[in-house]
């Protein structure tokens, strides 16, 4: 990915953009910028790896669906996260043209085979993985399916005042 082209495209789509070489630099930036707020997290492996909950909860009220709740508790907390002062999340994919894509179960962030595996859901992708060792997405109709919608962010939404995209020049997440 050409970061300069991506940054230019995101700015043309009305996003504020910051770019960091490492996740540690990005985590320090977020920790210094967010203070005294109510913060909600999307279900993000990248943010877990960055230890953002530990950092931010020292001086903010932070709601993270990954903090010790079962799946039903996760869903309730994920909905609460959408009403916070600041919502932090990550995306599944980003194009150099500035489009960002998430596949999601509840509409709050991201789902898919790796999240199904993380929660040990009995979905076809997890069953297949346990039999073969290959994690593969299926077009399933399982009742616990968590791949329910695909969202493509074409540009910053008009009714959202400020959206800052943090780019990290490392391979992170799933």
Image: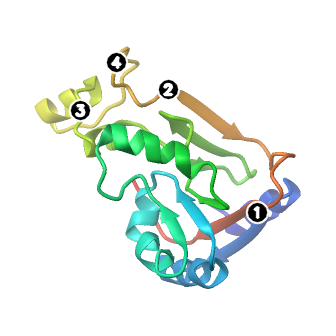
Q: Can residue 109 be seen in this view?
A: no
State which tag comes first along the sequence, 2 or 3: 3
Q: Nearer the viewer, mark 1 or mark 2?
A: 2
Q: Nearer the viewer, mark 3 or mark 1?
A: 3
The mark found on residue 5 in the picture is: 1
Secondary structure of residue under mark 3: helix
The x, y position of residue 3, in whole percent, is 68, 67
User: Compared with residue 143, is residue 136 higher up or lower down, i.e. above or below?
Assistant: below
Of all residues, the one furthest to the left in this rendering is: 131
Q: How far apart are marks 1 and 2 (CA)?
A: 31 Å
What residue is shown at x 20% (from left), y 34% (from top)? 129
Q: Distance between the residues labelled 3 and 1?
A: 37 Å
The x, y position of residue 41, in whole percent, is 52, 57
Q: Distance between the residues labelled 2 and 4?
A: 11 Å
Secondary structure of residue under mark 1: helix
Tags 2 and 3 in contact by the CB under 8 Å rule? no
């Amino acid at each position: 990915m050409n970061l300069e082209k991506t940054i230019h495209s995101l700015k043309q789509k009305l996003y504020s953009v910051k770019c960091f070489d490492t996740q540690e630099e990005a985590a320090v930036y977020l920790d210094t910028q967010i203070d005294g707020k109510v913060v909600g997290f999307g279900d993000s492996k990248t943010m877990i790896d960055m230890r953002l909950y530990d950092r931010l909860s020292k001086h903010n009220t932070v709601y993270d669906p990954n903090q010790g709740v079962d799946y039903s508790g996760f869903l309730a907390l994920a909905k609460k996260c959408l009403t916070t002062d600041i919502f932090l999340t990550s995306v599944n994919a980003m194009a150099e043209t500035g489009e960002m894509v998430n596949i999601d179960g509840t509409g709050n962030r991201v789902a898919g085979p790796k999240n199904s595996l993380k929660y040990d859901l009995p979905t076809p992708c997890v069953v297949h993985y346990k039999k073969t060792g290959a994690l593969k997405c299926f077009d399933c109709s399982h009742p616990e399916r968590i791949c329910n919608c695909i969202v493509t962010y074409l540009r910053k939404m008009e009714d959202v005042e400020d959206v800052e995209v943090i780019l990290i020049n490392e391979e992170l997440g799933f």
